[in-house]
Amino acid sequence: MNASNRIFLPLESDEAVAWQRFLNQIKLASKTLLLCESNVIQHAQFIQQSLFKDTKMIELVSQGEGFKSFKNLELILGILYQERLDRNSLLIVVGGGAFSDLCGLAASLYHRGMAWIVVPTSLLSMVDASIGGKTAINLGETKNLVGAFHEPVNLILYPESLKTLPQIEFNSGFGEMLKTVLLISAREFSLLESINPNQVSKDSPEILKLIDVCMKFKQKIVKADPEETKNLRYMLNLGHTIGHALESEFFYQVPHGICVAYGVWLEACLASKLHGIAPLLVAKIARVINTINYKLPFKPDAISVLNRCLGDKKNYRDTVGFVFLRDAGELRDGFHTVTRYGLDELKTPMQETFFECFA
Ligand SMILES: NC(=O)c1ccc[n+]([C@@H]2O[C@H](COP(=O)([O-])OP(=O)(O)OC[C@H]3O[C@@H](n4cnc5c(N)ncnc54)[C@H](O)[C@@H]3O)[C@@H](O)[C@H]2O)c1
């Protein structure tokens, strides 16, 4: 990606081919409609004027995670119907991960599936939520319980939109990037380590570089295992076993990517307790957590977090699955293996980990 351009189609290596494909998608669509959330209206207007001049734009009030409800799903489906979209129409969705998760689900259901294009505006949605076709809403307290795989036909990146992203949301995306670079290689991890997210310009070349590598890495993994049937996609859950448990321990008041960053750190520490691996890596990750500089509402309790790990929908038969690193870019158990541990094996090492990390 070149910082002097403002809009990218990042998922194809040949830019000219990517733009041609995009133009064809527009040409073939019977109708187009752009939906955006209110916090990003100025960016949506820029996207509309640059790429979708004749397209109607509808703005919905930003609600963050609260948007992912049945009520709002019905609202969006109603809009698609009122606007007389058909199954050959194209929906353009501009917003953060919560907004695109729900609009993508609506696109998967309307006429049993219509094409959609995502324009992610938060760092987390650029590097994670908008890639891989998972769409969902929440059911009661349970996150992402109702959803579908429905890949957008294209992804448009407008990095300048990050300039208005609140710092805490930027840091949350940075936490999710921490996970991804650790899966990629030591080189990408060093680049991330060299950046202070609280000081860097949000659309600087270093951040653009990290966005690019993280997007492409996730795209490569989901292409090889689109519906998580080969265990390969599972590696993207690095840091998420403890990360998800922390999210619920903190009543969803701490952003997802911050919990993931803590999860990556705690899981690395746990791996060093269980298997004696990567002690240096633990210290390096701790420094990244320090620069993110997020103050948790309270010290989490190891056993309570462990019990929440057991309740995670990805676990079964009273075991907890982890993706452990041997080093940056190197998984302990190989690409297709998830190692499961029983409660008794985990209790003491978890307590030691929490004692050390939250001393
Ligand atoms: N589908 C997937 O594979 C996947 C992966 C990871 C996360 N997710 C989901 O993504 C959601 C989190 O996404 P998120 O981190 O983008 O949070 P979010 O969508 O809740 O957005 C956070 C806040 O930032 C605002 N915002 C977004 N872009 C902005 C911008 N450029 N300027 C100003 N404000 C802006 C939003 O309006 C919101 O208030 C969660 O619901 C999570 O479950 C999905």
Image (cartoon, grey):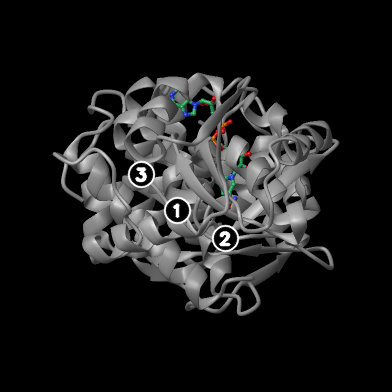
Frontmost residue, 217 versus 286: 217
Disc 2 on helix, strand or loop? loop
Q: In which quadrant of the rendered view does residue 93 lie? A: top right
In this figure, which residue is indicated by the disc labeled 3?
A: 157
Q: Is residue 209 left or right of residue 181?
A: left
User: Of residues 118 and 256, which is closer to you in this image?
Assistant: 118
Please state if 257 lies on the left or on the right of 282 as rendered. right
**Kind of residue at badge 2:** Glu
Disc 2/disc 3 C-alpha distance (Å): 16 Å
Amino acid tagged 1: Ile
Q: CA distance from mark 1 to mark 3?
A: 17 Å
Q: In the image, what residue type sits under mark 3?
A: Leu
Please tell me whether residue 20 is drawn above or below residue 104 in the rendered image: below
Residue at position x 63%, y 19% from top? 61
Q: Is residue 19 placed above or below 351 in the rendered structure?
A: below
Left or right, residue 201 beside residue 120: left
Of 140 and 319, the residue lying toward us: 140
Quick one: label 2, few (<14), some, or many (20+) residues within 10 Å?
many
At a point 25% along the width and 56% down the height, the residue shown is 188
Q: Are marks 2 and 3 in contact (CB under 8 Å)?
A: no
Assign a secondary structure to mark 3: loop
Vertical comparison of 195 with 319: above or below: above
Instruction: From the top left corner, tell me how far across and down residue 119 is, in percent.
Output: 45, 42
Q: Residue at label 2? A: 151
Tag in front: 1 or 3: 1
Question: How far across and how far down the image is residue 164, in percent?
Answer: 37, 20
How far, Cα to Cα, is label 1 from label 2? 17 Å
Quarter of the image where one finds residue 318: bottom right
Residue receiving disc 1: 26
Which of the marked residues, 1 or 2, is nearer the chain's N terminus? 1
Mark 3 Cβ inside 8 Å of ligand 1: no
Marked residue nearer the N-terminal end (1 or 3)? 1
